[in-house]
Image (cartoon, rainbow, N blue to C red):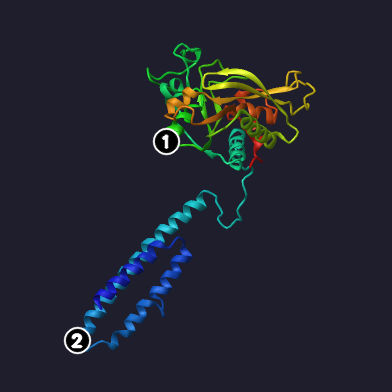
Amino acid sequence: MQEELARWRETALAAIAGASSLPELDAVRVRLLGRKGELTARLRALGELPPEERPAAGAALNRLRRDLETALADRRAELQDAADAVAAAGVDLTLPGRPPAALGGRHPLTAIIAEICEIFRGLGYRVAEGPDVELDYYNFKALNFPDDHPARDIQDTFYIDDVMLLRTQTSPVQVRVMEQEQPPLAVIVPGRVYRNEAVDASHAAEFYQVEGLYVDRDVSLADLRATVVAFLQQLFGRDVTIRFRPHYFPFTEPSVEVDMSCFACGGKGCNVCGRTGWIEIMGAGMVHPNVFAAAGYPADAYTGFAFGLGIDRIAMLRHGIDDIRLFYENDWRFLQQFRGLA
């Protein structure tokens, strides 16, 4: 019986300590010590014990009652003190709850990133990530940047030491993914990048990019164009048209700049597009053989394309925002306009 009483004692004390309000504590007291309580039932069962065991059992039950009454009194004092503190603070816990005056929402940049990633998931891409603090090898050398390329200058890049820097683009993830996986592969890489630029309405020292990479056998520039058209039409509407212009990037050959018809004027010319009818939207091209070589892909075995676009610029175009600094100032008057973004 002593072992059974010890187990019941622990259970009873735990119930007392777990009571979170005075009414709940009273219910525990009645269950344990009431006229029909658990301890009372044990006292009544004493008559069923052999005569020689009754004195010890009765003494044990009386000690147990005293322990439980002490625990109940201590817990009651704690709960009463807490209730008095709430009352002194002027809080009425019986009042119905009130919803917050203003609900938060996604930041416009976060919402654009999520939308872009969802579009590319629908095209068969997966999301990949890479470090913000990058090696010079991945940020420049493996991407075919010559040693004297202007982007390597400290005027453009934040260096940590001779071999590490804050990545200037999300393109290094291209090489990191290709080093670990064999084609076919299709990845989209959203992330923050850093450049040593004077901050103004259209430039920031840190901003967001999305990089895309597709590698397989017999991938062509026509595949790149079809992918870009499908993406921009889902993002800006079915009426969008695009054009490719020759350009130069160290990590692609051939390289192109991609323009889309102005969504604001339909290509007629307005303030948004500088009266040209076109908006520059991304850089792209076929992956340079030297980049494949740096990743360890065999020569002439695969082809692929890559593209990159600025998320901040997309958000500015989408919402008619004329100053990139607004995204990073955490001004509630600005952010509350986007509370409905999913």
Instruction: Work out which quarter of the rendered image holds the N terminus and state it.
Output: bottom left
Which amino acid type corresponds to the residue marked 2 in the rendered image? Glu
Can residue 200 be spotted in the picture?
no
Please tell me how many numbered marks the rendered image carries. Answer: 2
Report the residue marked by disc 1: 180
- Label 1 vs label 2, nearer the camera: 1
Report the residue marked by disc 2: 52
Mark 2 lies on a secondary structure that is helix
Of the pair 206 and 70, the residue shown nearer to us:
206
The residue positioned 50% from the left and 22% from the top of the image is: 168
The residue positioned 36% from the left and 61% from the top of the image is: 74
Q: Using the rendered view, name the quadrant where residue 41 is placed.
A: bottom left
Mark 1 Cα shell of 10 Å, populated few (<14), some (14-19), many (≥20):
few
Residue 131, percent from left and from top: 44, 30
Q: CA distance from mark 1 to mark 2?
A: 79 Å
The residue positioned 41% from the left and 22% from the top of the image is: 137
The residue positioned 44% from the left and 23% from the top of the image is: 142
Of the pair 69 and 39, the residue shown nearer to us:
39
Which amino acid type corresponds to the residue marked 1 in the rendered image? Gln
Q: Does 5 sit left or right of 298 as displayed?
A: left
